[in-house]
Amino acid sequence: MSDRQQLDQRQQLIDQKQQQQQQQQQPQYQGQDQQAQQQQLLQQQQQQAQALAQAQAAARRKFNLDDFRIHRTLGTGSFGRVHLVQSRFNSRFYAMKVLKKTEVVRLKQVEHTNNEKMILERVEHPFLINLWGTFQDVRNLYMVMDYVVGGELFSVLRKSQRFPEHVARFYTCEVLLALEYLHSHAVIYRDLKPENLLLDSMGHIKITDFGFAKHVPQNMTWTLCGTPDYLAPEIIQSKGYGKAVDWWSMGVLMFEMCAGFPPFFDEDHIKLYGKIMAGKVRYPSHFQPALKDILKRLLTSDLTKRYGNLRGGATDIKNHAWFEGVNWDQVYSRQIEAPYRPTIMGEGDASNFDDYPEDAEQYGVYPQGEVDELGSYFPGF
């Protein structure tokens, strides 16, 4: 199956979803044949759901390196890097995450890597990155994802120093809906920060890097992971924790966007964790009362008081005065104009990303007969 056929199937997938939504919005049938017609509609929906699953399974095809031209590096990490690549079939651009198996195993990131793949295959939301497919060879794992051309929100924040509250509110709204969606699917994200928020061509966000995300059906996990500045107190204390850690991190993100620096900071991580545990936040004088209030309700170590973790869930946050006037349906449908629209010269423009030295390794070119000793750690790749 060609890359073009895969994209066609993804479009069919979207069309079928829209048809389902339209049918679900139709009024109940009336008259003597109401029951029969409803039964017919149910059968149609079941058939569509089956077709949807088949199309989705087909869309998760296995790529290989020959399907792409590798251009430049978009980002680097401890055990891999992300490249801008171009399909040889439809000329579209994608982001390809390449992870070295030896480093993933050495750094004990096998579970996180498998979790990332599993979660990205299961989620679909306007403000989350899409995974198009995965594959592996004897040395590396490859994940083919959306190329989000506008770069990191972190870069925009760094240039602006800080955002006006209405700008921070725009990005927070989109983050909030994405977290709410993930939590509804029993997924904790655990790595919210400006570096992991990408901007598309229209200026809307896509959350990326699900390396720390975890499916937690029992609502509790214990792993110490995340970015130090954004860690919730319960993670530092090595207590069992749940979805509430993401709402804490959203509070840190809001503070940093509006202040230009995080609420807790120290070069020494031990001292940093002490500050987070103490929970003393100094709010800049330009913060409006509503902003201070919502931050106090998010940046509290008392889980019985932290917004997002109460009975009302994310709705408590949405109903806060700081979000007054927000039309959440318009946020979800991306109808609200973004405060910043990236400058883009074309689909493959990478000028919004930092420059990185290129790796000398040539993927896929290995000694004949080299054995894949680590492939069993990554079933399904």
Image: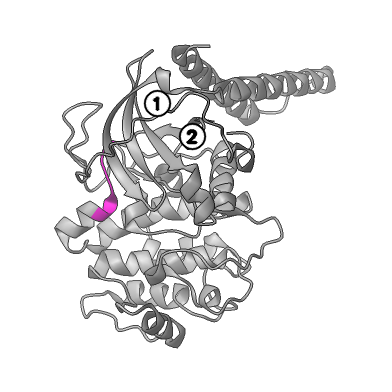
Tag 1 secondary structure: loop
Q: Nearer the viewer, residue 178 or 21?
A: 178
Q: Amino acid at mark 2?
A: Leu
Q: Residue at x 53, y 11 (%)?
A: 1
Q: Is residue 308 above or below residue 100?
A: below
Rendering colour mode? one colour
Q: Nearer the viewer, residue 213 or 20?
A: 213
Q: Is residue 16 above or below residue 228?
A: above
Magenta-span inclusion, residue 33 = no
Residue 67 image position (x, y, % from top left): 41, 18
Q: Residue at x 48, y 23 (%)?
A: 368
Q: Is residue 283 above or below residue 262?
A: below
Magenta-span inclusion, residue 150 = yes
Specify whether 291 is left or right of 347: right
**Which label belongs to residue 131?**
2
The C terminus: image quadrant: top right
The quarter holding residue 348 reads: top left
- The stretch of residues the image draws in magenta is 149-154
Measure the C-alpha gap from mark 1 to mark 2.
Answer: 25 Å
Residue 25 image position (x, y, % from top left): 61, 30
Secondary structure mostly taken by the magenta-highlighted segment of the chain: loop
Residue 143 image position (x, y, % from top left): 47, 35
Disc 1 target residue:
365
Looking at marks 1 and 2 on the same chain, the residue that comes earlier in the sequence is marked by 2
Q: Residue at x 50, y 43 (%)?
A: 101
Q: Residue at x 29, y 80 (%)?
A: 283
Comparing labels 1 and 2, the label whose residue is closer to the camera: 1
